[in-house]
Image: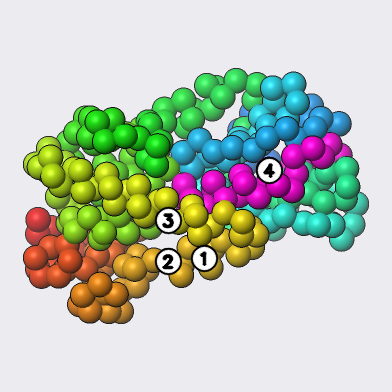
Amino acid sequence: MPELPEVEALAGYLRQRAVGRRVDRLEIAAISALKTYEPAPTAVTGLTVVDASRHGKFLDVHFEGDLHLVVHLARAGWLHYREAFPATTPLRPGKGPIALRVRLDDGSGFDLTEAGTQKKLAAYLVTDLATVPGVAKLGPDALAADLPTFAERLRSRRGQVKGVLTDQSVLSGVGNAYSDEILHAAKLSPFAITDRLTDGQVATLHAATRQILGDAVERSLGQRAAELKGEKRSGLKVHARTGLPCPVCGDTVREVSFADSSLQYCPTCQTGGKPLADRRLSRLVR
């Protein structure tokens, strides 16, 4: 799933390439992806792209006249920038990966695509960002939050730190992959309980969050959209590395699986050398 660093980089790429171009047309290929009906997609025709930004994990393309195309890429969504499209024939609704396409006046543009069968990519064409449900509920940006804000938000929700850190209403921008990396850097178990963390542990977690996200943003900015997934994978130390040695201590990276997701961690770095049990089989070791 694209998280804060990748979405920030996509916004940066659009600022470099699309800002100043007029929209030739917005085409919808997956009707279910567009969650709004007013204004109509034709409303952006002829408007200039004036900016691109990010709200948590939401990508926001700004058009003149205070119109916004806000997109949540979900688990399998992505943005593909095209210097030229192979044909000017409009997209037809179908079962392909393209959800929507924005054609610009110089012949370039971008596709928003979604792989797999679980079609959860969501696009909103709005004049008021508060009308986008996910944006309206976002907590403070995880990269921008200072220590007092971070501590207050983290302790506002009692629960396992992994789940609280990825709750977008608590802190926005962190998902499954970077939460694994942050907790590894902070040397915390993913199942540590937030209201049991010491002030020192919270400060360490805040510093790790800033470091991991900041480094990922720095590595990603300037990359082409097609290069970002590879850049993300190259910087991961524990996430999606089950069975491989931890690059910090050499212990084997372990995994806990859930119904539709999994997490990875290093026992030596994070749990005092003790493996965590799979919740599907037994209680978690904390």
Q: Is residue 137 magenta?
A: no
Residue in the foreground of this view, choosing between 256 and 151: 151
Disc 1 marks a residue whose amino acid type is Glu
| Residue where numbered disc 1 is placed | 231
Q: Which residue is tagged 4? A: 15
Residue type beneath disc 3: Asp
In terms of secondary structure, where does tag 1 sit? helix
In this rendering, the answer to whether 240 lies above or below 52 is below
Asked whether 27 or 162 is in front, the reply is: 162
Q: Is residue 103 above or below residue 188?
A: above
- As measured in the structure, the alpha-carbon distance from the residue carrying label 1 to the one carrying label 3 is 11 Å
Q: Residues within 10 Å of mark 3 (few under 14, many from 20)?
A: few
Residue behind mark 3 = 215
Task: Give the mark, 1 or 4, whose residue is nearer the N terminus.
Answer: 4
* Residue of label 2: 235
Q: Are marks 4 and 2 in contact (CB under 8 Å)?
A: no
Looking at the rendered structure, the secondary structure element under dot 3 is helix
Task: Report, in whole angstroms, how far the alpha carbon at label 4 lies from the one at label 2.
Answer: 24 Å
Magenta residue span: 1-29
**Can you give x and y, in whole percent of width and height, for residue 164 in the image?**
26, 41
* Circle 1 crowding by C-alpha within 10 Å: few under 14, some 14–19, many from 20: some
Which quarter of the rendering shows the C terminus? bottom left
Q: Amino acid at mark 4?
A: Arg
Residue 273 appears in view: yes
Residue at left 84%, top 57%?
A: 84
Are dots 2 and 3 in contact, CB under 8 Å? yes
Determine whether, in the image, residue 87 is placed left or right of residue 199.
right
Amino acid type shown at disc 2: Gly
